[in-house]
Image (cartoon, rainbow, N blue to C red):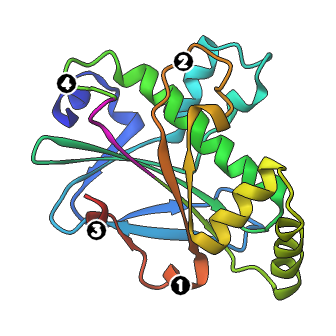
């Protein structure tokens, strides 16, 4: 699959390495500056986010503004004919609005990338393994307390439910019915988004081979 991509994609929009790849936050004021990713012996095929942004001209982004969103990191890895897609978003400040924005960025990036990959013979959304990560600063005690209090009140607000599961359970399952694409004809395969406190991986980075 990656060989097929190399045959057709402009070299300005991707890189390939068997070492480490960094996702760097473009906002200079961000407290989450960068995160390193490695994959042991496997090559990481990293797509330039501008490449995915260009697909905005194909979609009705005015009627669904969330479609304009792009996450910070997009990686592809092949292992024994299995295809893995990684989507990464960095967040410096916590609010239910900001973390749900991160979820939307991941959803939009996956859907736009899926539109592109569907053109390739070897790509099959049914067998593609999708992994997504949100990396943010650990919550202050008062924000943890507020989130827990709202959740325990029995709220059905999807923004709070998502943030609670993400922060305390470290994982949330994204399905089409709880995504920004629930009312669209776009194909959407469900996948988990996993949360990493930045403080825990700032020095060590994340080994993607553990997810292959």
Label 1 sits on a secondary structure element that is: helix
Stretch of the chain drawn in magenta: 126-131
Q: Residue at x 25, y 58 (%)?
A: 212
Which badge, 2 or 1, comes first in the chain's sequence? 2
Closer to the eye: label 2 or 1: 2
Q: Is residue 16 above or below residue 107?
A: below
How far apart are labels 4 and 1 at the CA level? Answer: 36 Å
Q: Pointer 3: residues within 10 angstroms few (<14), some, or many (20+)? A: few
Q: On residue 210, which mark appears?
A: 3
Q: Residue at x 41, y 21 (%)?
A: 116
- Is residue 27 something one can see in this rendering? no
Q: On residue 200, which mark appears?
A: 1
Give residue 148's quadrant in the image: bottom right
Q: Residue at x 72, y 19 (%)?
A: 61
Q: Pointer 2: residues within 10 angstroms few (<14), some, or many (20+)? A: few
Q: Is residue 186 above or below residue 10?
A: above
Residue 188 is situated, as x and y percent measured from the top left of the image, at 50, 28
Residue 154 is situated, as x and y percent measured from the top left of the image, at 85, 61
Label 4 sits on residue: 122
Which badge, 2 or 4, comes first in the chain's sequence? 4
Is the N terminus in the top left, top right, bottom left or bottom right quadrant?
top left
Label 3 sits on a secondary structure element that is: helix
- Is residue 44 something one can see in this rendering? yes
Magenta run includes residue 168: no
Q: Is residue 50 left or right of residue 178?
A: left
Q: Is residue 172 left or right of residue 11?
A: right
Q: Is residue 61 above or below residue 174?
A: above
In the image, 170 versus 80, the foreground residue is: 170
How far apart are labels 2 and 1 at the CA level? Answer: 36 Å
Magenta run includes residue 130: yes
């Amino acid at each position: 699959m990656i060989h097929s991509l190399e045959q057709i994609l402009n070299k300005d929009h991707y890189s390939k390495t068997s070492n480490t790849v960094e996702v760097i936050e473009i906002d200079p004021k961000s407290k989450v500056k960068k995160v390193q990713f490695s994959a042991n012996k496997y090559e990481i095929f990293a797509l330039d986010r501008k490449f995915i942004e260009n697909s905005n001209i194909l979609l009705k982004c005015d009627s669904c503004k969330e479609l304009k969103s792009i996450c910070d990191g997009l990686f592809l890895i092949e292992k024994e004919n299995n295809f893995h897609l990684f989507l990464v978003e960095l967040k410096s400040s916590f609010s239910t609005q900001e973390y749900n924005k991160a979820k939307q960025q991941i959803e939009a990036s996956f859907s736009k990338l899926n539109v592109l990959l569907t053109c390739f013979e070897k790509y099959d959304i049914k067998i593609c393994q999708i992994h997504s990560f949100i990396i943010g600063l650990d919550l202050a005690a008062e924000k943890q307390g507020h989130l827990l209090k709202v959740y325990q009140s029995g709220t059905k607000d999807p923004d709070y439910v998502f943030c609670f599961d993400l922060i305390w359970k470290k994982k949330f399952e994204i399905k089409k019915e709880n995504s920004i694409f629930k009312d669209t004809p776009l194909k959407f395969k469900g996948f988990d988004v996993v949360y990493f406190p930045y403080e825990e991986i700032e020095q060590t980075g994340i080994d993607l081979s553990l997810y292959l």
